[in-house]
Image (spheres, rainbow, N blue to C red):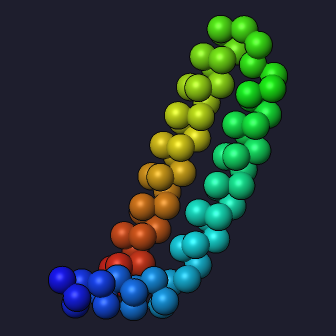
Amino acid sequence: MIELFKKAAKITNDNIILAIPLIAFMWIFGAYIGFSGVTADTLGKTALSLVTIWFMFAAFLSGWFYMVKKAVQL
C-alpha cells in the first residue's frame, strides 16, 4: 500500500500540470454556480442551470481523467 502512494506521489510530481485545469475549473465552476444562483429565479432557469452544471462537470471529468491516464502511461 505504501508503494502505491509513493508511485502516485511520483506521478503527481512528474506531471504537476494536472493541477492547473483542476484549479481553473473549480474557479470557473464556483463563479457559474454563484451567477446561476442569483439569476435562476424560475423553475425552468433552475433546471437549465442544473443541466448545464452536470454537463460542465461531466466534460471536465472526462478530459481531466484522460489527462491523468496519459500521465500514468507516460
Task: Please tell me whether residue 60 is drawn above or below residue 10 in the rendered image.
Answer: above
> 30 or 52: nearer the eye?
30
Q: Is residue 67 left or right of residue 24?
A: left
| Residue 49 spot, x, y in % from top left | 65, 25
Residue at image point 81% right, 22% down: 39
Residue at image point 59% right, 34% down: 53
| Residue 16 spot, x, y in % from top left | 55, 83
For residue 37, which quarter of the picture?
A: top right
Residue at image point 49% right, 89% down: 13
Task: Please tell me whether residue 70 is drawn above or below residue 4 in the rendered image.
Answer: above
| Residue 44 spot, x, y in % from top left | 66, 9
Task: Please state, as top left, top right, bottom left or bottom right, where the C terminus lies in the image.
Answer: bottom left
Task: Please state, as top left, top right, bottom left or bottom right, where the N terminus lies in the image.
Answer: bottom left
| Residue 58 spot, x, y in % from top left | 48, 43
For residue 9, which quarter of the picture?
A: bottom left
Which residue is the extreme one toward the top? 43
Task: Please tell me whether residue 57 is drawn above or below residue 69 in the rendered image.
Answer: above
> 66 or 43: nearer the eye?
43
